[in-house]
Image (spheres, rainbow, N blue to C red):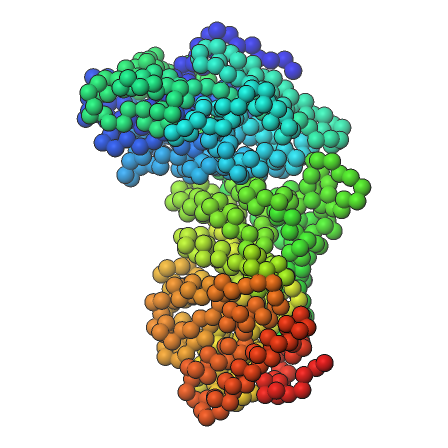
Amino acid sequence: MQTKALSPELVAMMDAYWRAANYLSVGQIYLYDNPLLKKELMLKHIKPRLLGHWGTVPGLNFIYVHLNRIIKAYDLNIINITGPGHGGPGLVANAYLEGTYSEVYPHISQDEEGLTRLFKQFSFPGGIPSHVSPETPGSINEGGELGYALSHAFGAAFDNPDLLVACVIGDGEAETGPMATSWHSNKFLNPVHDGAVLPILHLNGYKIAGPTVLARIPHDELEALFHGYGYTPHFVEGDEPMEMHVLMAATLDRVVGEIRRIQRDAREQGFTERPRWPMIILRTPKGWTCPREVDGKPTEGTWRSHQVPMGDMGHPGHVKLLETWMKSYRPQELFDKSGRLRPELAGLAPAGERRMSANPHANGGLFLRDLRLPDFGDYAVKVPKPGAVDAEATRVQGEFIRDVIARNPSTFRVFSPDETSSNRWGAVFEVTSRCSMAAIVPGDEHVAPDGRVMEMLSEHQCEGWLEGYLLTGRHGFFSCYEAFIHIVDSMFNQHAKWLDVTRGIPWRRPIASLNYLLSSHVWRQDHNGFSHQDPGFIDVAANKKSEVIRVYLPPDANTLLCVTDQCLRSRNCVNVVVAGKQPGPQWLDMDAAVKHCAAGIGIWPWASNDQGCEPDVVMACCGDVPTLETLAAVQLLREHFPALKIRVVNVVDLMKLQHHREHPHGLSDGDFDTLFTTDKPVIFAYHGYPWLIHRLTYRRTNHGNLHVRGFKEEGSTTTPFDMVVVNDLDRFRLMADVIDRVPQVGATAAYAKQAIRDKLIEHRQYIEEHGEDLPEIRNWRWGLGEKEKLAGGKRES
C-alpha cells in the first residue's frame, strides 16, 4: 500500500492542531474566565476548585489528530474508544474543535463566549463530568473505571465490517484483570464479516502516584508479551513533538496497510487462519508539554502531572506559571480574534459523520433496528392443568433464542462464559456455533469462525463484548451462572449509570437493553455446593435507578418465554431474568402466562380458595422454587385446615412490589392493598435474600404483617429439597409460619406442628442414608393428597 507522504507544512499544521487541543484541555481544567488570555491571567480567572486529570491528555490529543489524518487520507470509518477516560478534557476539546460539540450543545458556540462556557462547565456544578462520559460526543466508554476499553472495542467491531475501532489503553488500565483478558479478543474477530480493532497501548510511565508495570519491563519482553498475545506490535517512542508526528504518521500508514491486507485476503479468499492483527505501543512522557518543574520538583514526565500539575493556585508564582504554560501553545496562532479555530486548522478534521465525535456508530441507537422475533407462543409448553407436566424452562427458552439467531444473522449474538449448553441453550447449536478464530481440531463440537455464540471463560470479557455490541446498535443476551454474575458487578454498575445518564441527553438515541439470564441458580446448585449459591445480584441491580432496572423471576417455561420476548423488545434497560434449568412443574398455559406477565403480579385463583371473602392469609411467592414450595405448603394447609381461606399471589416482575412513584412498574398503594390486604398475615417465599422484599415494601400499609423467607446464606453439597430446608424456605416451614400467625387454625395446630417437626427429622435421616430426597418430595404433584404423608403415612420404598 502506498503511504501518504507528510509534507513539512502538514506536520506543522498537525502540531498546531495538537497544540489547540492541549490548550483547550488545560483551559477546561483551570479557567473560569479569560479563555483566550487577552488579559493578564489573574486568580479571579481561575476556578476555585481544580478537578481533572492532565497526565494522559496530551497523549490522547496526539493520537486523535493522527487518527483524523488517516480518516481523511484513506476515507476510513473510525470510532475512538478511550480507556484512560479521566482524560476527558482531551476528548471534549477534540469534539469542540471538530464542531460536533457546538452542534449538539449550541450554547457552547465556536467563539470566545463559547470557549468561556466550555472551560467553565468542566468538572463544575451544573456542568459536565471529568471523564469521557455519555455527554461527550463520540464516546461509548466512559473509562472512569478502568479495564473495559478493549472488550468494548471488539464488541463494537463484531458484525461491523467497515468499521475500524481505535482503542487507547493506558498503562494503568493495562494492569487490570479485565484488560489482561481482553487482549485475547483477537481470537474471536473474523476479518470476513467483522471490522477491525487497533489497540494503542499508551505508556506514559505512571499511575496516580507510582510507576506502571508495562512501562518498566524491557523492550524485548514487552514486544514478546504482545507477540505472544497474537499481535504485531509497532513502537512509537519519544518526546520531541515534530519527530514523533513523523514517526506516528508513518506507523499508522503501515498499520492501515496491514489491516486492509488482512481484510482483503479474508474477504476474497475466505477465512483460512487467524491473522496477526497490528497494534501500536506509544511511549510518551506523562503530562507531555506541561511545566518541567513545579515548586522545584520535576513534573512533566513524572507522576506529579497525573492530575492537576499546580493544585494550589494561591501559591506564589502558580498563576504566572499557568499563564506561561498556556501561552506556550501560542493560542494567537490557533484561534482568530473571535475565538474560532483558524480555518486552515479546522480543515484538518474530517467532515460530517467521518468525524469521530459525530460517527453514528458511537450513538448506536441511530443504527438500531427491531429484531425479527418469532412468535413466542409457538414454543409454548402444553399445560392441561397446573402442575400436571414438567419441563426445563431454559431449554424451552433456548429454542426461542435459536430462532432469534436464525432470523437476525448479523444483529444478534449470545454471550456466555462456557455455559450456553449448561444453561440448556443447546438448541442454538442447531443454527450456529461457538465463535473461534483459533485452531479447530477433530473432536471439537459446534466451533467455527463464523459462530454467533461468544464463549470465553471470563465474565468480564462477555460483559464487555456485549456492552460494546449494544452501544453500537445491536442486540444480545448474556447467559451466566447466577452466583458468578457477581464478577461483573462493577461493569453492570457502569453500564446502568451510562443508560441512566443518556436518558437525559436528547441526542443520544435509545439502544437495545442489556439482557441477563441467570440460571444454575442458588436453589439448584445443590451439586456444586456453597461456592455456587448466591442470589445477590438481584440486590445489586435493585440499587440502580428504577427507570433502568427490571428484574423478572418467571415461575415456569411459558412465563419465561413471555418475559424473554418482552426483554428483547425493550430499550435502554438492564433486564435481569432468573430462571431454573432443571425439570420443574409447569403452572400456566400460554394464555394465562401472557396475562400474568402483562400484569407482572397476580392472584392464582386455581391455587386460592378465598373467592368472595377476605383471606385469612396471603401466600406470596417469587421465583420458580419458592413458587413450588409455596404451592406445596398451600396444599398441606388446605388439607389440614379446610376452613382456612388462602390467597396465593405470584410475582413475576419483582419491581411491582415498589410504589409506582419509585419505579415505573410499581403498584399503587390501592392496588397493592387489594392483592395483599391491609391487615392479614402475608407469608412471602422469595428466591433471594429476604431483606430486599422488606426494602421494596417498607412503605406499604401491611408491611408489619409481612414475613419473608428466602436464602439466608446456608448451603452445601446436598439434595435440592434440603437446600430449601436449611434456609427455612421449605413447604413445612411455610406451613408452620401460617400456623404461628393465623389464630383461626384452632386446636389442631399443635398436632400439625409436631407432625412438621417429625417430617423434617425423617427428611434428614432419609437423605443422609439414601443421598436423595424423600419419594414424596421428588414425586410431589399439585392436586395429589399430602395429608397422610405429613401424618406419617406409608412411604414408597
* Residue in the picture at 48% in, 48% down: 489
Q: Position of residue 358 (x, y in %)?
A: 47, 31
Residue extending farthest to the right is 442
* Residue in the picture at 66% in, 55% down: 422
Foreground pick, 86 / 17: 86
* Residue 727 seen from this side: yes
Residue 289 lies, with reference to residue 527, above or below; the image says above
Quick one: quadrant of the N terminus? top right
Q: Which of the 4 quarters of the picture holds residue 296? A: top left
Residue extending farthest to the bottom is 747
Quick one: quadrant of the C terminus? bottom right
In this rendering, position of residue 121 left or right of residue 580: left
Residue 612 lies, with reference to residue 438, above or below; the image says below
* Residue in the picture at 38% in, 76% down: 705
Q: Which of the 4 quarters of the picture holds residue 675? A: bottom left
Q: Position of residue 455 (x, y in %)?
A: 64, 45
* Residue in the picture at 39% in, 30% down: 208
Foreground pick, 49 / 132: 49
* Residue 674 seen from this side: no
Q: Position of residue 528 (x, y in %)?
A: 62, 58
Residue extending farthest to the top is 8
Residue 529 lies, with reference to residue 146, above or below; the image says below
